[in-house]
Image (cartoon, coloured by chain):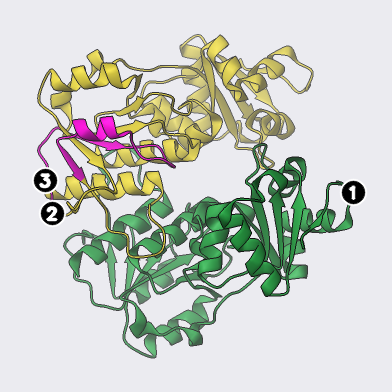
Chain colours: A yellow, B green
Amino acid sequence: MPREITAFSNPLIKRIRSLREKRHRREEGLFLAEGLRILTEAREAGRIPQYLFFARDSAAHPLVLALVAAVEAAGGEAIETVPDILSKLSGKDNPQAVVGVFAEFTRTLDSLDRYSASIWLVAERLRDPGNLGTILRTGDAVGAGALILIGECVDPFSVEAVRASMGALFTVPVVQCEWAEFLPWLRSGPGQLVGLSLDTETGYRTASYTAPTFLLTGNEAQGMPDGYAAQCDVLVKIPMLGKADSLNAAVATAVMAYEVLGRE
Amino acid sequence: MPREITAFSNPLIKRIRSLREKRHRREEGLFLAEGLRILTEAREAGRIPQYLFFARDSAAHPLVLALVAAVEAAGGEAIETVPDILSKLSGKDNPQAVVGVFAEFTRTLDSLDRYSASIWLVAERLRDPGNLGTILRTGDAVGAGALILIGECVDPFSVEAVRASMGALFTVPVVQCEWAEFLPWLRSGPGQLVGLSLDTETGYRTASYTAPTFLLTGNEAQGMPDGYAAQCDVLVKIPMLGKADSLNAAVATAVMAYEVLGRE
């Protein structure tokens, strides 16, 4: 039976709320995800929260019942609560009906099977959590093998990234590594490294792509270091007809990924 | 000569800061934009702020000097200030060197020349300011004639939308109107209305596009109403290989827009 918490001062509420900060996520190895749709996506992907908070007035919803059952079967705890506490946990005025607390999970390069997918997304020093989540969402849509994060990237378990991923954090493997690990791993087998660049005459619609294709997007403000670009098998550019010199990083990744997908 | 403001209690600072709220923007007809890059983009597009706030330690920067000169020539006011006040105005811990206060500007359908561009972006009940700004940024990149906002959309002059547009708010015309105005205007001349939909078998890469093409994207959560879809000349879908059933709205718009651009 779910227990009930309605007091802001409850120590568990304080602890869970602290997971909105990266430092606390690292200490606990836990992160927050919210919303019936995203938590159901997680459940279907086999990810069950350790704690599930749900609003009293949504307790009878079939998807909430399914989540509560899954959490209790997995030895987690389902907790009935009030909208104000859900607001406090999620940081939103209009809270979702459910908030889940999950164990963090990442993958290593060595655990990836490069033959399992033809498109792989690689982002370098990605700084915006919304971009990271949106790239994961695109990765799910194009059937990407993983999102490989190179260097100092924003935390994929931040509330904003999880929210923007719309559940794709649970379906697309995420690897965090350094360039010095990624490049030898990539070159230990087949794989075309395609870099998105402004310094090339090769249009993304005319380049040739060979699976498995690894699409490399650089930092939002600076692009990728020259040394990384030099290691790419091909550099491609997306045409820019206007005043601006670049696209949003998640948009550029998606335009590239759908071009590669469309060639198959 | 720029005057100097260093006191938080200054009434102008309070007034400008209130522009972070939509209600005050509507009352004043003014909005905030920040950052040297975006304000320079605005200046080059002929948009000069009524007030320009700049950090004392950036006063010698050539782009700041150019902005100050432009503002004073246009009868506006350039105000030297301190980082804490720039933080307060922009709502960011690490403020940009400049914050500008601009008069709002929108266009009407009748002012658009549909022969001036082959791609036009149309968004319906768009709710997320980041999506709106990102769509504007993409619109700039593909040379879109305008972004036409249908129905209850998020405010294009919100701080988040302006920021995400990276200056494209100043280069891409924005129209706000109702569907009942848009449709007769569209049908009063040539124009293919292409709707992004999940309920079609027509892939976006196989459909035919005829300029001027109007790309219609629906609400982030619900897509477009059936009645709107019925008025489209063609409905197209973007393939979704994963668990999720939709892309981010700005991503979907960009994938479509670049496909249409690539056909030209």
Looking at the image, is B260 positioned above or below residue A163? below
Q: Position of residue A44 (x, y in %)?
A: 37, 27
Chain letter belonging to callout 1: B
Q: Which mark is residue A264?
A: 3
Give the labeled residue for mark 2.
A206
Give the labeled residue for mark 1.
B9
Mark 2 is on which residue type? Thr
- Which segment did they paint magenta? A207-235
Q: Are marks 2 and 3 in contact (CB under 8 Å)?
A: no
Q: CA distance from mark 2 to mark 3?
A: 14 Å
Q: Secondary structure at mark 1?
A: loop
Q: Are marks 2 and 1 in contact (CB under 8 Å)?
A: no
Q: Around disc 1, counting alpha carbons within 10 Å, would you say few (fewer than 14), some (14 to 19), or many (20 or more)?
A: few
Q: Around disc 2, counting alpha carbons within 10 Å, would you say few (fewer than 14), some (14 to 19), or many (20 or more)?
A: few
Q: Nearer the viewer, residue B216 or B24?
A: B24
Q: Residue at x 18, y 45 (%)?
A: A260
